[in-house]
Amino acid sequence: MVRWVIGAGALGVGLLALAVGAALQVGQSRSGGLLAFESSRDGNTEVYVMDAELGIIWDASRSPAYDYAPAWLPDGRLSFASNRGSNYDIYALELVTGRLDNLTNSADNEYLPAWSADGRLAFVSSRDGDPEVYVLDVSTGEARNISQHFAGDSSPAWSPDGRLAFLSNRSGSLDIYVYDGSGLNRLVGSPTADFAPAWSADGRLAFVSDRDGNYEIYLLDNGETHNLTRHEAQDDMPAWLPDGRLSFVSDRDGAPNIYVLNLETGELTQMTYGVGDDLRPAWKW
């Protein structure tokens, strides 16, 4: 597939408007979807969006600040963390109009957004002195500390049924815990590191582990764990596509790029070919 990267300048801005309009046309049937990711390909970390069907890539955040960790809202906006203010906050961008809203607007650093299907925002914040996982009711502005531990807690991920997974080193190693609204349980744990949880639409959990001596993508399905990638490269940052395929970041071609794996056929497709690091894929249909 030919990939077109839209740059700055008057021509770039015009092409950007056309590309976004085409990609987000109301009612359009999309077979490829939109892939948001962070990249340092222009020398500064920004959030990019790729139309996976048309092969068009554009810089969505367009700021000299450090913009990273994209996550789609249920209403179609794109959120990410940015230090364009005095600290890191979570912003929501309307791609067509360019409207940008600061959702957390805090004096503390807030980052790694994750959205539930009903519009709740989970994120990491140091507002209590150490990294904790919070859930924000965007309509009221009320934020609740879910993890409540002096250990490092990070990487929230919502399940389809509203449970919240996150990683924590409270046991002495990096493990994945899940909060179900009433209590907290360890979901994945080993003597080595297990992290970067990602839920599929049907409730399977992908995560990263070095339990075999190398960072690989694993799948937890009906209580059984399977190594999906089995490669000597470093594989990280899993993210599900709505059709059940799984994307992840790998440096198997020499630089971190984004790949898509069909779990049924084993087919692997490279999605990005950045000269910088292409990280943290997030998909929208």
Image (tube, helix red, strand yellow):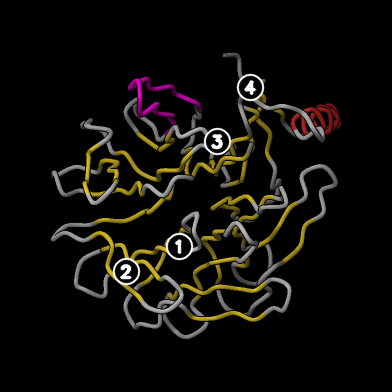
Query: Disc 3 to disc 4, how far (Cα)?
Result: 21 Å
Residue type, label 1: Pro
Say which label, 2 or 3, has the lower sequence index: 3
Say which label, 1 or 4, has the lower sequence index: 4
Could you tell me residue 69's position as x and y percent? 54, 53
Q: Which residue is mark 4?
A: 53
Q: Which residue is mark 2?
A: 168
Seen as rendered, the residue at the extreme bottom is 128
Say which label, 2 or 4, has the lower sequence index: 4
Residue at left 59%, top 66%? 121
Q: Secondary structure at mark 1?
A: strand
Using a 10 Å C-alpha cutoff, classify the residue at mark 4 as few (fewer than 14 neighbours), some (14 to 19) or many (20 or more): some
Using a 10 Å C-alpha cutoff, classify the residue at mark 1 as few (fewer than 14 neighbours), some (14 to 19) or many (20 or more): many
The numbered dot on residue 156 is 1
Q: In terms of image quadrants, where is residue 143?
A: bottom right
Query: Disc 3 to disc 1, how far (Cα)?
Result: 26 Å
Residue at left 35%, top 82%? 149
Residue type, label 3: Arg
Say which label, 1 or 2, has the lower sequence index: 1
Residue type, label 2: Ser
Seen as rendered, the residue at the extreme top is 1
The numbered dot on residue 41 is 3
Q: Nearer the viewer, mark 2 or mark 3?
A: 2
